Image (tube, grey):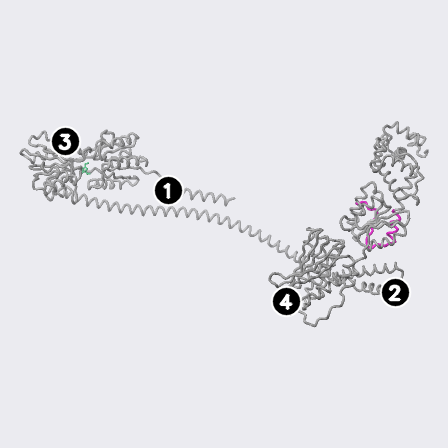
């Protein structure tokens, strides 16, 4: 949190500092605009220079300047542009008075101060005028000429642009003054437009007027010089005196022309540049100022020109000094500004350094604390890690021990199994043995061999995963090898009517592999294919080369049941029981995968339920992939003539119809449910002498048989394809038609959890495999007996004696009676229970129900129901229920009706019976 606050503070300081640096630059400068009518002549250049010099003392003033080039319209446009630029004051020297008046008036009316300089507008709307008195200049010129021309003299006037106020006023001043001097006569007036060239042209055009002229008064020096030039080149023209206006110093200007004797005199006409700026500042700063600022004038001629020139030069020198000083001042200001900026930056940096330093210290402290915490956590983790390593070592040790034990015990199994199989084979082939004994022995041998195969596979897989056995491959004739394998499956495939084919269209003849191991691979895959392919199916083994020709693909394709998606991903997992779990140990395919991988190959499977399965072995061609250690180059012993006949033939039990009905006229019947043929066969063999038998290979079929035949007992396996034995128990116990049938569950799993599941499903007994046959028989007999006892008691209860469990009563009749009893018992509390209701539930007609009850129990259906109600009522009285409760529970419409019926049946009222139960 403090770090966050410091950050905010830091940003704030930076902001304040930076805004301080920019404060000056952001305050608005005052804007003075100067619109010049024509800027190209020396007089007006001097005016601009003066203005700028004056402005250099006021750096906060922004100066805008335009030159209209003597074009009225252009000057109007330029003033409009100024207005858009938000100017604070306008200085204007209008080109011509009339055309410029409206725009200057408009500026004035917008409350923007206007200073008119040199020339004026016609309206006189302005804040101030700066310039000499042109009227007085005209008059002064007349006075000068009068003084220098004593006799009657002729004068020519050269005026400026007619519409300009300076020209108009100068002419007016001259003419008025001339009236005072009768010896002076204005002979001619021409307009030189303020320009030398125009003047020359105009004089040429009117040259006759310039004969015998005594004086020329040109309204500026430029036009005077034009006149001088014209007179020089024209012998007919002459003039004693030539007077101009401006008296500007510098090369080619009036003052120089006077000094070199070309021009007689000139009237000083100051530009007033500095005065204009001073007046403008006074207006902007709201100081007092004069509206009319008339500049002094004087006559300059031979008598004072040198002095004036000297003065000008001195002023010029001083001005240069001032300029230099100003330059120096500017440099100092720049240095000062840059130092100020540097100082500001330094201050900001310092503040930031302090703030960041603070943050760094806080962060350092917090990091230190975090590190300490992390160190503690790290120590804890290291400790836990050590514990985990220790535990993992312990687990590994115990797992190794278990695995060793597993391997050892598997080996231990081999010897006794061999000792069972070998003598058994001896015994089996002895002459004169009863057929039944041979059958039993065959079963024993078949299962002992199955166990031996399983043990061998277990040992193999342990060796592969633990010992990392190295491959011992040698070159084999592929076709011969595969033909032998296929041949070895022939007897079984013929028996199951399944076609097995092998084809090798590739050029591969020789393949490197370990034949003993590869046999196991094909044995597993083909046995599986045979197991899961129906009669008349087919198994095709085909080879194919991959596109690079370096791997051979051997495909084993069947059109059997297929494997569901959910199981296919785990099919190569060792001990995976998800698929066909009841069929095997889940080792064979895991072993096959280990072997193929060991051969640097891959095994894959694809399958579609009810369409078939395809296993593909991808094996490298040639021996490039094998190291020397993986090759066995010892001469090949030829494999035995017939491979694995024991496994292939002995593995499969004989085909039988697994839904058997063996009816040998016994009183009771048992339904035996198991998917394992040998178990079914064994139980049938042992039970058929005592019971009528039904067999079923799965729960679905068992369900149908149980409902149809209602046996006296059911013995069922738990793990079966499809529904389990527990599912069967649950379904039958929930059905009133079979709920009374005792069920024995046979299971290979001896766990408390499974036993509990059996009990919850309402199994009557749970016997684990391997079971003791006599115990199973005794349990079966006991369960049937107790059910019989119960029934006998129930029958005697309802005084129906003519139905006994003797041999004359068929299974179907007993099923019928059980069903009837269950329905009536369920609906006993319903006083509206009718014969029709019962018939409907039993799926027979009312008449059929009546006839069967009459024939079996020798009573009507309603009598039967009434007797059941009263018997139950008797029990409930003895259990302490009150009469009203009993009336409800046994379905009498009223307690009076109940009392009457009870008295009629037992000769005493329910209340008397409650007091003296022995009385009945
Ligand atoms: C310069 C000028 C000056 C003259 C003034 C009159 O453009 O012609 O010579 O005195 O303008 O406005």
Count neighbours of disc 1 (C-alpha within 10 A) and say few if under 14, some if 14 to 19, many if 20 or more: few
Q: Nearer the viewer, mark 4 or mark 1?
A: 4
Count neighbours of disc 3 (C-alpha within 10 A) and say few if under 14, some if 14 to 19, many if 20 or more: many
| In front of the other: 387 or 465 | 465
**Residue behind mark 3:** 173
The first of marks 4 and 3 along the sequence is: 3
Task: Answer whether labels 1 and 3 touch (C-beta < 8 Å).
Answer: no
Task: Answer whether labels 2 and 4 touch (C-beta < 8 Å).
Answer: no
Q: Within the displayed image, which quadrant is ligand 1 positioned in?
A: top left
Under circle 3, the secondary element is helix
Alpha-carbon distance for marks 1 and 3? 56 Å
**Residue 776 sits inside the magenta stretch:** yes
Instruction: Give the residue at x 28% y 31%.
Output: 108
Under circle 2, the secondary element is loop
**Residue behind mark 4:** 622
Q: Is mark 4 within 8 Å of ligand 1?
A: no
Alpha-carbon distance for marks 2 and 3? 170 Å
Q: Position of residue 718 (x, y in %)?
A: 79, 50
Say the numbered circle drawn on residue 400.
Answer: none
Horizontally, residue 888 falls left or right of residue 379, namely: right
Q: Position of residue 596 (x, y in %)?
A: 67, 62
Q: Is mark 1 within 8 Å of ligand 1?
A: no
Q: Position of residue 864 (x, y in %)?
A: 89, 35
Residue 323 drawn above or below residue 605: above
**Residue behind mark 1:** 22
**Residue behind mark 2:** 430
**Span of residues in magenta:** 761-783
What is the residue that sits farthest to the top in this orientation? 896
């Amino acid at each position: 949190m403090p770090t966050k606050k410091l950050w905010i503070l830091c940003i704030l300081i930076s902001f304040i500092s930076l805004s301080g640096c920019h404060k000056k630059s952001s305050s608005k400068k005052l804007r003075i605009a100067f619109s010049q009518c024509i800027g190209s002549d020396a007089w007006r250049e001097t005016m601009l220079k003066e203005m700028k010099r004056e402005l250099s003392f006021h750096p906060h003033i922004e100066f805008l300047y335009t030159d209209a080039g003597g074009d009225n319209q252009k000057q109007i446009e330029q003033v409009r542009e100024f207005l858009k630029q938000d100017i604070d004051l306008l200085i204007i020297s209008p080109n011509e008075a009339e055309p410029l008046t409206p725009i200057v008036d408009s500026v004035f009316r917008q409350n923007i101060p206007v200073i008119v300089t040199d020339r004026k507008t016609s309206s006189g709307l302005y804040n101030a005028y700066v310039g000499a008195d042109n009227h007085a200049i005209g008059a002064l010129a007349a006075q000068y000429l009068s003084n220098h021309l004593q006799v009657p003299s002729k004068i020519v006037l050269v005026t400026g642009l007619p519409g300009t106020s300076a020209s108009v006023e100068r002419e007016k001043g001259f003419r008025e003054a001339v009236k005072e001097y009768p010896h002076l006569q204005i002979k001619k007036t021409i307009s030189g437009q303020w320009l030398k060239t125009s003047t020359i042209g105009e004089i040429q055009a009117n040259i006759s007027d310039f004969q015998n002229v005594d004086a020329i008064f040109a309204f500026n020096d430029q036009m005077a010089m034009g006149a001088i030039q014209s007179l020089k080149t024209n012998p007919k023209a002459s003039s004693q005196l030539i007077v101009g206006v401006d008296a500007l110093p510098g090369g080619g200007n009036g003052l120089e022309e006077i000094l070199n004797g070309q021009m007689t005199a000139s009237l000083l006409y100051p530009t007033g540049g500095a005065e204009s700026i001073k007046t403008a500042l006074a207006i902007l700063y709201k100081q007092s100022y004069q509206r009319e600022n008339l500049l002094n004038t004087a006559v300059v001629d031979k008598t004072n020109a040198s002095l004036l020139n000297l003065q000008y030069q001195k002023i010029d020198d001083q001005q240069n000094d001032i300029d230099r000083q100003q330059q120096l001042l500017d440099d100092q200001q720049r240095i000062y500004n840059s130092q100020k900026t540097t100082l500001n930056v330094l201050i900001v940096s310092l503040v930031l350094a302090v703030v960041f330093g603070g943050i760094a210290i806080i962060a350092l402290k917090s990091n230190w604390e975090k590190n300490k915490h992390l160190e503690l956590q790290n120590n804890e983790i290291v400790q836990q890690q050590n514990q985990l390593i220790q535990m993992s070592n312990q687990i590994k040790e115990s797992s190794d021990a278990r695995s060793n034990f597993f391997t050892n015990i598997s080996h231990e199994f081999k010897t006794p199994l061999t000792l069972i199989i070998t003598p058994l084979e001896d015994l089996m082939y002895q002459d004169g043995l009863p057929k039944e004994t041979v059958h039993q022995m065959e079963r024993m041998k078949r299962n002992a061999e199955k166990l031996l195969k399983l043990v061998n596979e277990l040992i193999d897989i342990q060796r592969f995963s633990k010992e990392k056995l190295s491959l011992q491959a040698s070159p084999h004739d592929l076709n011969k090898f595969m033909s032998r394998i296929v041949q070895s499956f022939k007897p079984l495939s013929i028996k199951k009517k399944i076609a097995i084919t092998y084809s090798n269209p590739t050029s591969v003849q020789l393949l490197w592999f370990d034949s003993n191991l590869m046999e196991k691979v094909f044995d597993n895959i083909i046995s599986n294919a045979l197991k899961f392919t129906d009669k008349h199916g087919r198994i095709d083994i085909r080879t194919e080369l991959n596109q690079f020709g370096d791997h051979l693909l051997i495909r084993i394709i069947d059109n059997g049941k297929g494997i569901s998606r959910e199981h296919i991903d785990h099919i190569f997992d060792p001990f995976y029981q998800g698929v066909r779990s009841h069929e095997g140990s889940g080792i064979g395919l895991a072993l096959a995968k280990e072997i193929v991988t060991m051969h640097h190959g891959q095994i894959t499977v694809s399958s579609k339920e009810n369409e078939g399965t395809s296993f593909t072995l991808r094996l490298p061609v040639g021996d490039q992939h094998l190291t020397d250690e993986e090759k066995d180059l010892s001469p090949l012993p030829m494999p035995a003539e017939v491979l694995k006949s024991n496994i292939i033939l002995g593995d499969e039990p004989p085909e039988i119809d697994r839904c058997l009905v063996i009816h040998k006229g016994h009183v009771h019947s048992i339904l035996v449910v198991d998917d394992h043929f040998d178990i079914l066969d064994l139980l049938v063999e042992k039970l058929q002498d005592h019971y009528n038998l039904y067999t079923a290979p799965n729960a679905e079929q068992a369900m149908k048989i149980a409902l149809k035949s209602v046996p006296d007992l059911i013995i069922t396996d738990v793990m079966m394809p499809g529904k389990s034995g527990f599912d069967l128990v649950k379904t039958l116990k929930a059905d009133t038609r079979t709920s009374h049938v005792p069920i024995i569950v046979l299971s290979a799993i001896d766990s408390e959890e499974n036993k509990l599941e059996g009990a919850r499903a309402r199994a009557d007994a749970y016997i684990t495999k391997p079971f003791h046959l006599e115990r199973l028989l005794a349990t079966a007999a006991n369960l049937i007996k107790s059910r019989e006892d119960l029934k006998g008691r129930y029958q005697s209860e309802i005084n129906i004696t003519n139905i006994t469990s003797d041999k004359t009563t068929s299974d179907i009749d007993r099923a019928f009676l059980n069903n009837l009893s269950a329905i009536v018992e369920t609906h006993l509390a319903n006083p509206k229970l009718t014969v029709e209701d019962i018939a409907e539930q039993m799926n027979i007609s009312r008449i059929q129900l009546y006839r069967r009850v009459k024939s079996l129990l020798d009573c009507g259906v309603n009598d039967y129901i009434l007797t059941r109600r009263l018997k139950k009522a008797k029990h409930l009285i003895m259990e302490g229920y009150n009469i009203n409760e009993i009336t409800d529970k046994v379905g009498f419409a009223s307690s009076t009706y109940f009392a009457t019926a009870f008295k009629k049946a037992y000769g005493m009222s329910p209340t008397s019976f409650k007091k003296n139960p022995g009385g009945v």
